[in-house]
Image (tube, grey):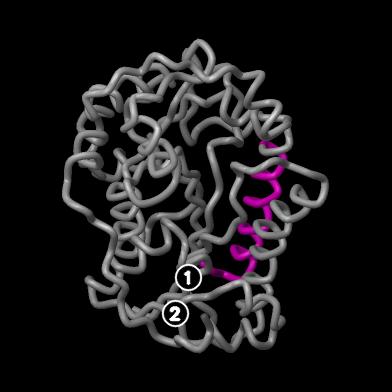
């Protein structure tokens, strides 16, 4: 299949692009420049693609100034709206649209599956709801629409784990505060597998949680990572310090959601890494696994 991906050069996008290429698919990457050039160009870029995957979004782990909040909104909601509008211009639009969301749609008060409606009322919660609403507009075009709500994606070459490995290897790691906050996670390989399954099963549609079956806590994650590296974890990170550095964004680090995937296992999907210890051990000890950069179609769009 010919598959367009926004955010193809990011952490998840790079892994997904490599996997799709290995499986014989042709990937059309979309960059910020493609969106900046307007709807006609964007429609031309995705014309002929059977699937559009939306991974675009500015990083969350930065201080949220008023202007950066606007960037977080525009890079998710406006980008998603533009993709839907571009697909609406095509005589033969893609048959499938897989967009991204986050488990920040929920608060930290319970254990949530896809059966539960989003209930977070903070900035990220509202952002997730609006993000998903923008993606669902593709359904009005008759396009099969899926929304993947990501848990914290663990990979040695990107995301949270890449940031934590250097201090933990130096023996400077520790929990955030008391470490009791929930820590829902997924191994990057399982996340990629979920996309591969979605491409094969045309019956899949709607919201799917991409989260391992057993949520942990920040303390459990900290101890597991320290044990895998044979390092102590004696230096808790004070929430006040995070607040001073990141402002409102610190709430993402000091809080957490307990989220599981119910719909994927019901389809027969089996997580290769259902235990946190297994996932961390694989990511810490497996030889360097940064995906080989494939030869991408439409390279002039990068």
- Residue 206 counted in the magenta span: no
Q: Residue furthest front?
A: 170
**Compared to 47, does 173 lie above or below?**
above
Is residue 209 in view from this perspective?
no
**Compared to 227, does 102 lie above or below?**
below
Residue drawn at 66 percent across, 83 percent down = 89
The answer to whether residue 190 is left or right of residue 118 is: left
Give coordinates of residue 218: x percent, y percent. Answer: 43, 21
Badge 1 vs badge 2, beta-carbon distance below 8 Å: yes
Depth check: give the residue in front, 264 or 30: 30
Q: Which mark is residue 52?
A: none
Give coordinates of residue 24: x percent, y percent. Answer: 24, 77
The answer to whether residue 286 is left or right of residue 103 is: left
In the picture, which quadrant includes the N terminus? bottom left
Q: Main secondary structure of the magenta part?
A: helix
Residue drawn at 50 percent across, 32 percent down = 115
Residue drawn at 34 percent across, 25 percent down = 171
Depth check: give the residue in front, 234 or 184: 234
Spatial distance from mark 1 to mark 2, Cα to Cα?
6 Å
Mark 1, residues whose alpha carbon is within 10 Å: few (<14), some, or many (≥20)? Answer: many
Dot placed on the residue nearer the N-terminal end, 1 or 2: 1
Examine the image and state in which quarter residue 277 appears: top left
- Residue 131 counted in the magenta span: yes
Q: Which residue is mark 1?
A: 5
Q: Residue furthest right?
A: 66
Magenta stretch in the rendered image: 125-143
Q: Which residue is mark 2?
A: 28
Give coordinates of residue 253: x percent, y percent. Answer: 56, 29
């Amino acid at each position: 299949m010919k598959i367009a991906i926004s955010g193809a050069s990011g952490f998840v996008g790079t892994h997904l692009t490599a996997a799709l290429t290995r499986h014989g698919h042709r990937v059309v990457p979309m960059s910020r420049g493609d969106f900046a050039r307007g709807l006609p160009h964007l429609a031309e870029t995705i014309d002929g693609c059977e699937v559009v995957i939306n991974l675009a979004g500015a990083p969350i782990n930065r201080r949220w100034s008023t202007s950066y909040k606007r960037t977080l909104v525009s890079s998710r909601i406006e980008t998603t709206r533009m993709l839907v509008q571009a697909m609406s211009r095509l005589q033969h639009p893609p048959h499938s649209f897989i967009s991204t969301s986050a488990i920040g749609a929920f608060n930290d008060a319970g254990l949530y599956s896809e059966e539960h409606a989003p209930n977070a009322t903070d900035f990220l919660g509202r952002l997730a709801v609006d993000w998903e609403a923008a993606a669902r507009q593709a359904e009005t075009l008759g396009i099969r629409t899926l929304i993947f709500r990501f848990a914290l994606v663990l990979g040695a070459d990107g995301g949270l784990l890449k940031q934590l490995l250097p201090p933990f290897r130096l023996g400077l790691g520790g929990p955030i505060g008391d470490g009791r906050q929930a820590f829902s996670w997924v191994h990057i390989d399982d996340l990629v597998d979920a996309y591969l399954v979605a491409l094969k099963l045309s019956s899949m549609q709607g919201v799917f949680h991409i989260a391992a079956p057993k949520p942990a806590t920040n303390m459990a994650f900290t101890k597991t990572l320290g044990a895998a590296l044979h390092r102590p974890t004696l230096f808790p990170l004070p929430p006040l310090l995070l607040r001073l550095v990141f402002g409102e964004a610190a709430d993402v680090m000091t809080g957490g959601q307990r989220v599981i995937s119910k719909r994927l296992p019901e389809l027969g999907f089996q997580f290769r890494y259902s235990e946190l210890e297994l996932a961390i051990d694989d990511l810490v000890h497996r030889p360097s696994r940064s995906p080989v950069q494939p030869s991408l179609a439409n390279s002039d769009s990068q």
